Image: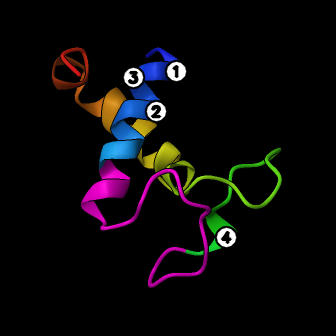
Amino acid sequence: MDEQRIKRIARAMCRASKLDPDKPAGNKGPFTMSMRQPGHESPQPAWMLFRQEATQFAARHKDVAATL
């Protein structure tokens, strides 16, 4: 799955969680910086908290992800 598609899915997941995908991620509710992507310095955009889940979603639902 291409990187831009993963990013779009992760940003949508972030918005669905009522977080601004472009604001720095923080320790809000169930989302913590311990979920931070390796190799990225703090602060990182909030959408990156959902990158792993977006990758998993795209792998499980290839037909749906292909349309996004």
Q: Residue at x 43, y 16 (%)?
A: 1
Residue occupied by mark 2: 7
Q: Residue at x 30, y 65 (%)?
A: 17
Q: Which mark is residue 3?
A: 1
Query: Residue 44, image x and y in percent?
Result: 68, 54
Q: Which mark is residue 53?
A: none
Q: Is residue 36 above or below residue 39?
A: below
Q: Is residue 13 left or right of residue 7?
A: left
Distance (Cα) linking label 3 and label 1 = 5 Å
Please say if the residues under marks 4 and 1 sit with CB atoms less than 8 Å apart.
no
Q: Earlier in the sequence, mark 3 or mark 4?
A: 3
Q: Is residue 40 left or right of residue 9?
A: right
Asked whether 46 falls inside the magenta stretch, the response is no
Using a 10 Å C-alpha cutoff, classify the residue at mark 2 as few (fewer than 14 neighbours), some (14 to 19) or many (20 or more). some
Q: Nearer the viewer, residue 7 or 53?
A: 7
Instruction: Give the position of the C terminus as an image quadrant.
Output: top left
Q: Earlier in the sequence, mark 4 or mark 2?
A: 2
Query: Residue 4, image x and y in percent?
Result: 47, 21
Residue occupied by mark 3: 5
Please say if the residues under marks 3 and 2 sit with CB atoms less than 8 Å apart.
yes
**Amino acid at circle 3:** Arg
